[in-house]
Image (cartoon, rainbow, N blue to C red):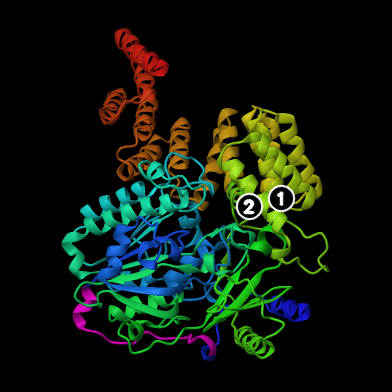
Amino acid sequence: MVDFFLKIVKKGLIILISKFLLLGAFFSTTSCSPSSKDWNVLLITLDTTRADRIGCYGYGKATTPNMDRLSQEGVKFENAYCQVPLTLPSHCTILTGTYPLYHGVRNNGNYKLSEKVETLAEVLRAKGWRTSAFIASFSLDSRFGLDQGFEVYDDDMGEERIKTFLSERRAEKVYEGFSKWYRSKGEGKWFSWVHFYDPHLPYDPPEPWRSEIEDRYDGEIAYMDEYVGKLVEEIKGEEDRTLIVIVGDHGESLGEHGEIQHGFFLYEPVLKVPFIMVKKGDLPKGRSVKAKVRLIDIMPTILSLLNIPSKERFDGIDLKPYIYKRKNNDLASYIETLYPEESMNWSRLMGIIKEDWKLIVAPEPELYHLSFDPEEKVNLYNSKIEKRKELHAILDDLLSNSLPQATEKYSLSSEDIEKFQSLGYISGGKRRNFSEPLPDPKHRIEVIKIIENAQISEFENKATSIVELYKKLISLEPYCLFAYTSLAEGYMKLNDINSAINTIKKGIDLIPDSYYLWTTLGKINFKIGNLNEALYAFNKSLDLYPENFDSLYFSGWIFNQLGKKEDALSMFERALKIEPENKRLGQDYAVTLAEVGKSDNALSILKELLNKYPEDTSIYRDLALVYFASKDYKMAILTAEKGLKIKEDIELYRTLAVIYEEIGEKEKVSYYMKLFENAKNE
């Protein structure tokens, strides 16, 4: 069996599913009424949401009145399966209608969707739809490629200069972004994707859901449901001509099979998701589809309902025959997770769900009859030999009929890597011995528990516990690099700088070509003011990986502080090529341009940023400083005062004091410095 598994692994991660197996290579040509071409489309994706925690899916404790109501107004798919229990690859599946094997995005963080793969947004935009997306988590940041086809891709997580995996925003903020766009979009048909991330760890619902609902995970879902309702209310004037699609990207394990969260395993809690479609006057009301369907079916179904043929190949199919009761057979699905392999150097998992049977291929393979054993407690692999042969043959056929990947690996910044790894999302480093078979994740439950407890300690900011748990993890998995960076962060929280530095150096001794360990060392030295040591570490990182965003950005800051403005500009320019939409980086670059006498270029950049972020007073401050540097004191004062009309900003008080000091108005200097000191002391 190990030989068979290794054979599968060696075949690579394949992207085209056999058309005989999974009804792939489908071309959407089904027709519907011509008027349907003018429907709007609102796609709402619910991150980390189990179907069995929604009221309309039978959960008695649920507080999900909006989704429950929408299920009665449209079609509910009772057995919808994701194909991979990870945020980025699952959303790529939703928006391309293809398996990860084809679209090529296999994990969070270190993959980017290839421009060769056509997205739903690209198809609709080419047909005249206005397109927008409102994202709640860095997992779906534009750098990972899902912005293809969107006129507006709002992934602004707030004030952070450098976004990390922990960057996210609540449903309220996502809704506000959508509402602002919706009210100003003008006439015409539109497609908008709204992503809610709230049920992801840490489970921390706001009030009143926090107090009123005992289970925190349920509280997050209830809070999210509130904003599902607000979205629908927002489009009320167009609801009759809007197709609403609500779907989970993957579920969540709440302790089943020893897993908390998701990603390590392929059991039902992480694969089954809510899936509801509503279109008043066109889709049937209160219809429940019991057949097993897949997230790969969403894009071809939407295009079919809109009467849009597509030249792009699909692994999914049009679900209209299921919606209108012309078909009721289960659809077979390929499933996978590379999470264990790329986080811990354990075995990846892949499998097939066909009718009532699920095969999970692993070093110790598993076979379950889902109707008789929905909790997957009885492994029938050794007793149901013919069934396992059948499913293995399907999987082998799938692998044998594949084409080369259509994707790109994405090279992350060190900060991204550390944070993705802190949840086990990407590669932990080199394997100790490549000839050894990879461990089965289910035989590493104790290590998984250590990781999960360490993550919870990080969310709860319990530094002592962070240190204890990551030290234990390193003793068990010494090549797990995220353990070194997380342990160093724990020491930093305890203000034990020497231990933090020694921890990273220990990791570097183990794997000296790890550019993100060098970057972490640079950050620690930067934080304590050792600029030369920090710059040395960042240079080592850039020698190993020249496009490391964090090292470029931090090096720019250091060169600025050392007065080496041209070197700073060079670093900022390289960083902007990687993340051109980074607001803070744009501001730093503009201010540095002004400092070397290129005020016109600086003003152009800052005015463009101000058009995009008209209520960001820090941009007014920087703009005022650029006017000041170019000796346009009148515009500097007007700009700073305009910023203060938006909201109080103590830095604008200080900026005005500096300007008035330069032009010799001492009373104004005293006035604004007094305001600055009062605000500072509040």
**Which residue occupies 47% across, 57% down?**
140
Q: Main secondary structure of the magenta part?
A: loop
Assign the N terminus to one quadrant of the image.
Answer: bottom right
Q: Is residue 558 magenta?
A: no
**Whole-percent x and y of residue 425?**
61, 57
**Vertical side of 13 occupied by 623: above or below:** above
Please name the residue shown 31% across and 23% down the image: 633
Corner quadrant of residue 432: bottom right
Q: Quadrant of the C terminus?
A: top left
- Would residue 503 be visible to someone looking at this image? yes
Question: How busy is the neighbourhood of tag 2: few (under 14 within 10 Å), some, or many (20 plus)?
Answer: many
Q: Amino acid at mark 2?
A: Gln
Q: Sort mark 1 into few (<14), some (14-19) or many (20+) by Cα contacts within 10 Å.
A: many
Q: Are marks 1 and 2 in contact (CB under 8 Å)?
A: yes
Give x and y (percent) for residue 548. 61, 49
Q: Residue at x 20, y 70 (%)?
A: 241
Residue 306 percent location from the top left of the image: 28, 78
From this view, report whether residue 217 is shown above or below residue 37: above
Asked if 378 appears above or below 467 in the picture, the reply is below
Q: Quadrant of residue 448?
A: bottom right
In the rendered image, which residue does mark 2 sit on? Answer: 421
> Residue 607: x, y in percent?
33, 40
User: Which residue is rendered at x = 33% and y = 90% of the image?
Assistant: 326
Secondary structure beneath dot 2 equals helix
Q: Which of these two is toward me, 516 or 256?
A: 256
Any part of residue 136 in sight: no
Q: To which residue does mark 1 refer?
A: 481
Q: Which residues are magenta?
A: 21-38
Q: CA distance from mark 1 to mark 2?
A: 8 Å
The three-letter code of the residue at mark 1 reads Leu
